[in-house]
Amino acid sequence: MSIITYFSKKKYNLYKRTYTVSGAGEEISWERLKVINAYVEPAEKLTGSELGDYEEAELVLYTTDLIRNKEIVEIRGEYYEIRSTEFWQIPYMTYYKGYLVKTDEDISI
C-alpha cells in the first residue's frame, strides 16, 4: 500500500484540453483521461513554473499516477489546472506532486 492510498482513498477525474483550429476559429474540446487516486492538501505559494506564471497555487495533489502540466483535475465539483509538477522517488515509492490553480473552464463532456 502506498502512502497516498493510506492517507486518501479519494478518486478524481483527470481531463485533457484539445484545441482544433478551423476556418471559424479555435474550438476547445475535453477528453477525460482517467480517474486517479490522490491525496490533496492546501498549498504554499507557487513561486514559478515552466509556464512562466507566478500565480498562487491553491492545492497540492499527490498521486502515483502520471500527471502533466495543463491537465485539469475535478475536485469536489470544481476544476483545477495543474500548473507545475514534480516527480519524487523515495525508497519503495515513487509519486507525482502537482500544484493546482482553480480555473473557470467550462468542461462539458
Image (cartoon, helix red, strand yellow):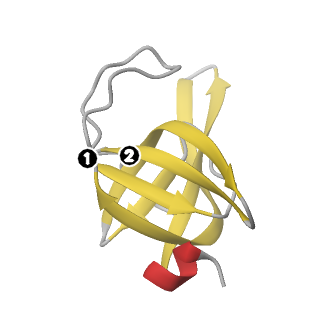
Residue type, numbered disc 1: Glu
x then y, percent, for residue 41:
31, 61
Residue at (65% x, 24% y) in the render: 22
x then y, percent, for residue 29:
57, 46
Residue at (28% x, 45% y) in the render: 104
x then y, percent, for residue 31:
63, 56
Give SS at disc 2: strand
Nearer to me, 108 or 59: 59
x then y, percent, for residue 108:
45, 60
Q: Quadrant of residue 76?
A: bottom left
Residue type, numbered disc 2: Leu
Nearer to me, 89 or 66: 89
Q: Which mark is residue 58?
A: 1
Asked if the residue under mark 2 is in contact with the one under mark 1, i.e. CB atoms within 8 Å, the reply is: yes
Decide: few, some or many residues near mark 2? Use Cα within 10 Å; few <14, some 14-19, many ≥20: many
Q: Give the residue pinned by disc 2.
A: 100
